[in-house]
Amino acid sequence: MRTADLVRTALGIADVPVVGAWQLAERDYGTLTGMAKRHVLERFGADAFTTWRRTVDGAPPPASPRQIATWECMPPPAVAEHLEVGAGESSREVIGRVRPWWDQTRDRLPPGACALLVAHGNSLRALRAILERLDDATLTGVNIPPTQPWVATLDGATPTAPVHGRYLDVPAAKAGIRRIEAEGGT
């Protein structure tokens, strides 16, 4: 929400309403929450890292109540009332909560409308999977560069047709993707 407010201010459209959606919350990483990717790799090894972070069906183990009690930053109540905090989610589960939100949102957009979606990496990755109809193997390789707008044009697209987008600043997006890949992915 803070990022959306900053973007609206920068674009001079501060009067445009912001609509929050719990479905776009970042993926719950369970016991991995708050751990740097390199620490996950060091502590649990490459196989677990890949399974939990990159595969579509792999979910990290849940966090213990003791671990959750140490977290300084908790999801807002609007998210916590819908998701089990600390349970750990797979990418498929994130897609499962983003898809109904997208279907409802798409159906409410008037023809020719322009909407800005600000979300976390894995929620955006889930939306890309839905829009582009990505198979599991392709989705495993998708990385979302932070702060790089990706534009998808829906005009004339049917709800079942794949939609492809483009980054506004391709060189910056590619550099961001390389950085994310070097860290172990989105």
Image (cartoon, rainbow, N blue to C red):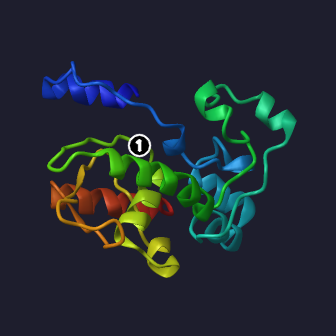
Say if 18 sits above or below 37 in the image: above
Q: Residue at x 50, y 73 (%)?
A: 140
Q: Residue at x 44, y 31 (%)?
A: 20
Place of residue 175 in the rendered image (x, y in percent of width and height, measured from the top left): 26, 59
Question: Three-letter amino acid code at disc 1?
Answer: Ala
Residue with the most extreme top position: 15
- Residue of label 1: 119
Say if 147 sits above or below 46 in the image: above
Which of the 4 image quarters holds residue 76?
top right
In-image side of 1 versus 15 (left or right): right
Which of the 4 image quarters holds residue 159?
bottom left
Q: Residue at x 67, y 33 (%)?
A: 80
Place of residue 161 in the rendered image (x, y in percent of width and height, measured from the top left): 31, 73
Place of residue 16 in the rendered image (x, y in percent of width and height, measured from the top left): 23, 25
In-image side of 178 versus 138 (left or right): left
Q: Residue at x 47, y 48 (%)?
A: 101
Whether residue 146 can be seen here: no
Place of residue 77 in the rendered image (x, y in percent of width and height, measured from the top left): 63, 25
Element at badge 1?
A: loop
How many numbered tags mark residues here?
1
In-image side of 77 versus 114 (left or right): right
How would you rate the neighbour count of disc 1 (Cα within 10 Å): few for under 14, some for 14-19, many for 20 or more? many
Whether residue 1 can be seen here: yes
Q: Where's the N terminus, which quadrant?
A: top left
